[in-house]
Amino acid sequence: MMKTAYIHSDLYASYNLGPRHPLQQSRLIDICETLRNQGAFDTNLVLMEPSPCSESDVLSVHDEEYIQIIKRASQGETGIPLSRYGLGPGDTPAFAGMWENGLLYCGGSKLCASLVADGKFKRAISFAGGLHHAHYDHASGFCILSDIAIAIKTLKGSGYKRVLYVDIDVHHGDGVEALFRSDPDVMTLSFHESGAWLFPGTGNVQDRGSKSAEESVWNVPFAPNTGGDVWCSTVSDVTNHLMDRFSPDAIVLQLGADALEEDPLGHLVMTRWEWLQTVDTLLRLFGDKPVIILGGGGYCRAAVVDVWSRVALLAAGHPWQNGLEFGRSVSSTDALDFHRSTMLYLQEKRGLQF
Ligand SMILES: [Zn+2]
């Protein structure tokens, strides 16, 4: 059994981007409730409360001026040039209490890192984290503070030299990539719908890390209407290959659940069965290395509640397939063509062998 910590606070839901915003963190309350009703919390899946991280944790990954803006907006101050920092009406509105909430969800991801580093847990989950579009000095794509970067830094500060970041959200993990692209000890690997069709418009297969850290950046884009017939094996095969190549000491897994067919924002068409089987395969690949599991996107509430509660069961070694409908999805011809050229590039230019 893999002893797994599940970090949750109902206060996570105070990440309040507005009543009609696609990202509703109240979904996290439903997931915890689902797990509680199933009697899932026990000695192998341990429910724990997060505590806020410190301002210095945030300063270790973000620009000080940006932090000051967040704090002022959090207190309801008006007349701040929010849009200069990616905040304001639109994707990522400022809201009262955003600084305190940010410290809490970053604290949840940091706690995951501390718990696996202490050796008390092999895996730790905080679905409030995984906000992968947050940048050094600005907010983007519903994301304000980079809990992911704080978790990675905490792992590195605890003696894990090499950290692999794997992101299966339908959107490119641009914020995390940008924060670590010159660090040879962090590899960021993002599987996403190509930026030619979807926000944030980045994440090309050709992208590499900075000069001294070329291997730090890996992108595997897919075209709209890519199904599980190619997505599932690509996610596991590429991850497997890079695990061998990079030999990480710890893994951070971003599990945005918006590559599912039900999702209203993305155009990939994974069934819940395919998506969960792939997560299962990834966790098997990671073996007994420490793994932090974070959330991310996911805009069909019923689907997200279903798959993330099953991920918690899966991570803890509990039965997780009960009542899960078998389903396969098939890629369109255009999606297959796009995929072939992506794989050809990875083989010919970056030496991946399949
Ligand atoms: Zn997303």
Image (cartoon, rainbow, N blue to C red):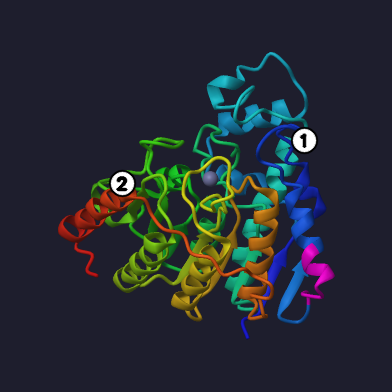
Which one is nearer the viewer's eye here, 67 or 81? 81
Q: Is residue 266 above or below residue 228?
A: above
Task: Find numbered disc 2 in the image and state the secondary structure of the residue it sits on.
Answer: helix
Instruction: Indicate if the residue with disc 2 has its beta carbon within 8 Å of ligand 1.
Output: no
**Numbered badge on residue 332:** none
For the question of whether residue 217 can be seen, the reply is: yes
Magenta-span inclusion, residue 29:
no
Q: Quadrant of residue 291?
A: bottom right
Q: Which residue is mark 2?
A: 334
Q: Residue furthest bottom?
A: 1
Q: Position of residue 286 (x, y in %)?
A: 46, 75
Q: Quadrant of residue 303?
A: bottom right
The C terminus: image quadrant: bottom left
**Residue plotted at (64% across, 22% down):** 89
Q: Residue furthest right?
A: 37
Q: Is residue 103 above or below residue 84?
A: below
Q: Which residue is mark 1?
A: 97
Which one is nearer the viewer's eye here, 51 or 157? 51
**Residue plotted at (33% across, 54% down):** 218
Q: Position of residue 172 (x, y in %)?
A: 44, 45
Mark 1 closeness class: few <14, some 14–19, many ≥20 residues within 10 Å: some
The N terminus: image quadrant: bottom right
In the image, is 284 to the left or to the right of 53? left
Which one is nearer the viewer's eye here, 179 or 125? 125
Give the residues in magenta.
Answer: 34-41
> Sequence-wise, which precedes: disc 2 or disc 1?
1
State the CA–CA distance, disc 2 to disc 1.
45 Å
Task: Find numbered disc 1 in the image and state the secondary structure of the residue it sits on.
Answer: loop
**Residue plotted at (77% across, 24% down):** 76
Q: Position of residue 150 (x, y in %)?
A: 56, 52
Q: Quadrant of residue 235?
A: bottom left
